[in-house]
Amino acid sequence: MGLADLATTAGKMMVGNDSSLLNNMDGYFSSLSFSSSDYARGGIAGTEDDVKGHPWALENMLNMGADVFLQLAEQRWLFRYGAALFKGKEGAALMNENGEKAAKA
C-alpha cells in the first residue's frame, strides 16, 4: 500500500490536512495493511508476555521467508538492470554486450 499512502500524503500536503476525502482514503488503505497476530508480536498487550515475544511462531517464520525471497528478487533485479538505472542507454548497451559475452562463454 506504499503508493496509496504516498498519494494520500501528497494530497494532504497540497490541499491541507483537514480534507475528509483524503482522511477517509488514508483510513481505508491503512485498514488493508498487513499486521501480525498478538501472539506472534509478543502476547496480549498489558501482560508479561508483551515483552518477550514469540520469534519462532509459524507466522513470524513465514513472514521472514517471504521477506527473504522478496529481497532476493529485488537484488536480482538491481543486479540485472542497475547499470541502466544509473548510466541510461549506454549502461543498458554495456550490460547487453557483457551478457552476450557471458552467454557465449
Image: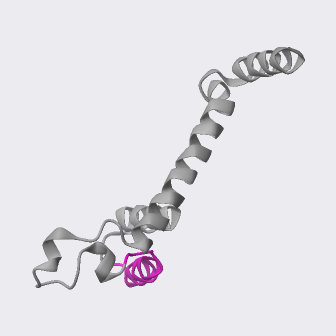
Quarter-of-image position of residue 16: bottom left
Q: Is residue 96 above or below residue 9?
A: above
Outermost residue, front side: 56
Q: Is residue 79 above or below residue 43?
A: above
On screen, residue 59 versus residue 55, left or right, reads right
The residue closer to the viewer here, 77 or 29, is 77
Q: Is residue 91 above or below residue 63?
A: above
Q: How many marks?
A: 0
The residue closer to the viewer here, 64 or 78, is 64
Majority SS type along the magenta span: helix
Q: Is residue 7 visible?
A: no
Q: Is residue 35 magenta?
A: yes
Q: Position of residue 89 (x, y in %)?
A: 74, 23
Query: Which quarter of the rendering shows the C terminus?
Result: top right
Q: Is residue 78 above or below residue 24?
A: above
Q: Residue at x 39, y 64 (%)?
A: 9
Q: Position of residue 49 (x, y in %)?
A: 16, 78
Q: Is residue 84 visible?
A: yes
- Give the image's coloring scheme: one colour
The residue closer to the viewer here, 10 or 60, is 60
Q: Position of residue 28 (x, y in %)?
A: 45, 83
Q: Is residue 43 magenta?
A: no
The residue closer to the viewer here, 17 or 64, is 64
Quarter-of-image position of residue 101: top right
Q: Which residues are magenta?
A: 19-36
Q: Residue at x 30, y 72 (%)?
A: 17
Q: Residue at x 48, y 80 (%)?
A: 32
Q: Position of residue 76 (x, y in %)?
A: 63, 38
